[in-house]
Amino acid sequence: MSKNQGRTRPKHIPQRMCVVCRQTSAKRTLTRVVRTTDQGVQIDPTGKLNGRGAYVCDNSVCWQRIAETDVLEKALRTTLTEEDRQRLRARIQA
């Protein structure tokens, strides 16, 4: 009989950090924002789009900061266009 037989390991839950407040949380509770080559910066609700991604928690203050400051630009290593900022502001109001 094996030493670990009958014992179950707890399921691994991937952890990610919000780029604004630096709080670590489960990956599924955060929203991914991704820089794509052809569509600019997009909100990725599925978490599966190709491109460089950053995670933001659901705190409204964090969403306001990524729309108004350069925090997201540094994380994604890009420059946000006004269209990208409008998409982020629309997420805040929704």
Image (spheres, rainbow, N blue to C red):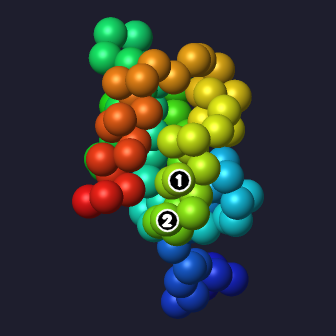
Please give the label number shown on residue 64: 1
Image coordinates of residue 72 in percent, x first then y, are 60, 36
According to the image, label 2 marks what residue? 60
Q: Residue at x 58, y 58 (%)?
A: 62
Badge 1 marks a residue whose secondary structure is helix
Q: Residue at x 66, y 33 (%)?
A: 70
Q: Is residue 65 visible?
A: yes
Image coordinates of residue 21 in percent, x first then y, are 70, 60
Badge 2 marks a residue whose secondary structure is helix
Depth check: give the residue in front, 37 or 8.
37
Q: Residue furthest right?
A: 22
Instruction: Assess whether mark 1 and mark 2 are in contact (beta carbons under 8 angstroms).
Output: yes
**Snapshot quadrant of residue 9:** bottom right
Left or right: residue 32 compared with residue 10: left
Total numbered labels: 2
Residue flagged by tag 1: what amino acid is it? Gln
